[in-house]
Image (cartoon, helix red, strand yellow):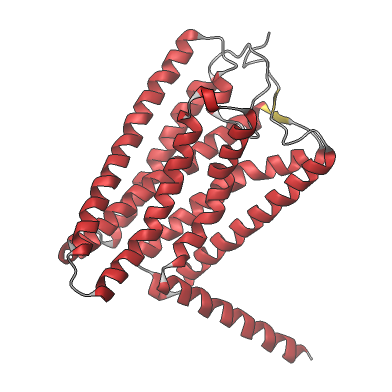
C-alpha cells in the first residue's frame, strides 16, 4: 500500500525484456527524434528567416512546430534513457512534469489546428474579409488563447490526477506517464469521479472543436468545387489537404488510443498506438506541412542552398 505523498517513483513499461531489443528501441527512437528535431527546426528557421513566410499560415506553422518539438522532447528522452540503461523508473516529480507537459503540448496543438481550420475557411470562403478577420493582432491573440487554454487544461488535469491517493502499486502500463494509467493506481472513488467529470468536459470541448473542423471543411470543399479554373482548385486544395491530413492523424490515433474497446486491447497494441500518436505523429507532421506548401519548400531550398554555399566558401577560404 502506498499513496501519492509517499511514492518516490513510478515504473514505466519496458519495450522488451532482452537487452538487444531495448538497444534496438533506443536507436529507433533516436532516429525518429533526430528526424523530428531536424524537420521542425528547419521549418522554424525557414519561417523566421524568409519574409515570404511571414504570413498567417507561416505563423501557425511555427506554433505547430513548437508543439511537435515540445511533445516529442517530453516523452522520448526518458524512454531512450531507460532503454539504454536497462531501467524502468521515473521519479514522482518527473512523472508529474511529463504528464503536464505532454498534455500541454498536445492540447495546444489541437486548439491550434482548430484555429488553422478557421484560417483556411476565411481564406477560401470569405477572402475579401481575410485581412479584417485574421490580421496579425487577431492571429497573435488566437495563438495565445490556444496556448493559454492548453496550459489551463493541462494544469487542471495534472493537479486533479496527482491529488488522488495511489494504492495500487506504482507500475504504469505505458512507456511514459499518462493520466489513464495513473488513474488505474488510484483507490479514491471521489477523486475518480472528479476526473471523470473533467474527462466529460474535455470530451465536450474536443468534440465541439471536431464539429467546427468538420463543418468548416464541408464549407471549404463546397467553395473549392465552385472555383471555375482547375489551377485555382488545385491551389486551394494544396493549402487545405496538409492541414486536414495532420488533423486526421491526430484525431484518429488519439481517439483509438483512448476509446478503443477493451475486447481488442492488449499491451502490445496499446504500446504501438501510444508510439504512433506521441512519437511518430510529431515527427511526421512537418513532412506533411511541407509536402504541398510550395512557398515553404522554396524557403527550405533557398536556406539549405545558402548554408551549403556558405560552408563551401568557408572551406575554400580556410584552404
Q: Residue furthest front?
A: 263
Q: How many numbered circles are shown? A: 0
Q: Nearer the viewer, residue 185 or 99?
A: 185
Instruction: Estimate the x, y position of residue 7 in percent, counting from the top left.
Output: 68, 18
- Residue at point 47%, 73% (across, down): 297
What residue lies at 68% left-to-right and 19% top-to-bottom? 170
Residue 132 in sight here: no
Residue lying at 19% horizontally and 69% vertically, measured from the top left: 227
Residue 192, given in percent of the width and then of the height, sits at 47, 14
Instruction: Classify residue 134 as left or right of residue 59.
Output: left
Indicate the quadrant containing the N terminus: top left, top right, bottom left or bottom right: top right
**Which one is nearer the viewer's eye here, 22 or 154?**
22
As displayed, is residue 35 above or below residue 177? below
Q: Position of residue 94 (x, y in %)?
A: 65, 33
Q: Is residue 133 left or right of residue 98?
A: left
What x and y, as percent, mark residue 120? 28, 58
Quick check: 110 above or below 136? above
From the viewer's side, name the closer residue of 39 and 104: 39
Examine the rendering and report whether any part of residue 182 can be seen. Answer: yes
The quarter of the picture where residue 14 lies is top right
Quadrant where the image shows the C terminus: bottom right
Left/right of residue 127 with respect to residue 40 in the rendered view = left
Amino acid at each position: 500500500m502506498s499513496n501519492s505523498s509517499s511514492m518516490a517513483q513510478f515504473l514505466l513499461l519496458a519495450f522488451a525484456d532482452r537487452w538487444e531489443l531495448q538497444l534496438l528501441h533506443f536507436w529507433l527512437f533516436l532516429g525518429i527524434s533526430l528526424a523530428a528535431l531536424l524537420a521542425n527546426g528547419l521549418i522554424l528557421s525557414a519561417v523566421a528567416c524568409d519574409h515570404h513566410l511571414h504570413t498567417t499560415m507561416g505563423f501557425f506553422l511555427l506554433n505547430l512546430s513548437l508543439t511537435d518539438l515540445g511533445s516529442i522532447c517530453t516523452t522520448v528522452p526518458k524512454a531512450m534513457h531507460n532503454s539504454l540503461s536497462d531501467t524502468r523508473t521515473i521519479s514522482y516529480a518527473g512523472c508529474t512534469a511529463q504528464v503536464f507537459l505532454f498534455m500541454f503540448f498536445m492540447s495546444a496543438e489541437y486548439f491550434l489546428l482548430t484555429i488553422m481550420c478557421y484560417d483556411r475557411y476565411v481564406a477560401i470562403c470569405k477572402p475579401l474579409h481575410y485581412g479584417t478577420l485574421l490580421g496579425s493582432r487577431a492571429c497573435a491573440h488566437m495563438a495565445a488563447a490556444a496556448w493559454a487554454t492548453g496550459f489551463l487544461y493541462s494544469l487542471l488535469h495534472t493537479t486533479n490526477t496527482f491529488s488522488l491517493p495511489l494504492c495500487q502499486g506504482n507500475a504504469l502500463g505505458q512507456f511514459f506517464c499518462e493520466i489513464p494509467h495513473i488513474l488505474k493506481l488510484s483507490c479514491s472513488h471521489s477523486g475518480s469521479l472528479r476526473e471523470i467529470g473533467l474527462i466529460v468536459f474535455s470530451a465536450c470541448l474536443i468534440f465541439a472543436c471536431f464539429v467546427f473542423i468538420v463543418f468548416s471543411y464541408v464549407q471549404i470543399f463546397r467553395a473549392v468545387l465552385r472555383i471555375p479554373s482547375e489551377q485555382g482548385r488545385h491551389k486551394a486544395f494544396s493549402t487545405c489537404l496538409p492541414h486536414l491530413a495532420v488533423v486526421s492523424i491526430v484525431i484518429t490515433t488519439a481517439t483509438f488510443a483512448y476509446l478503443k474497446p477493451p475486447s481488442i486491447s492488449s499491451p502490445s497494441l496499446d504500446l504501438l498506438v501510444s508510439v504512433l500518436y506521441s512519437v511518430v505523429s510529431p515527427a511526421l507532421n512537418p513532412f506533411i506541412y511541407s509536402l504541398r506548401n510550395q512557398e515553404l519548400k522554396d524557403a527550405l531550398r533557398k536556406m539549405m542552398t545558402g548554408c551549403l554555399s556558405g560552408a563551401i566558401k568557408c572551406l575554400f577560404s580556410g584552404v
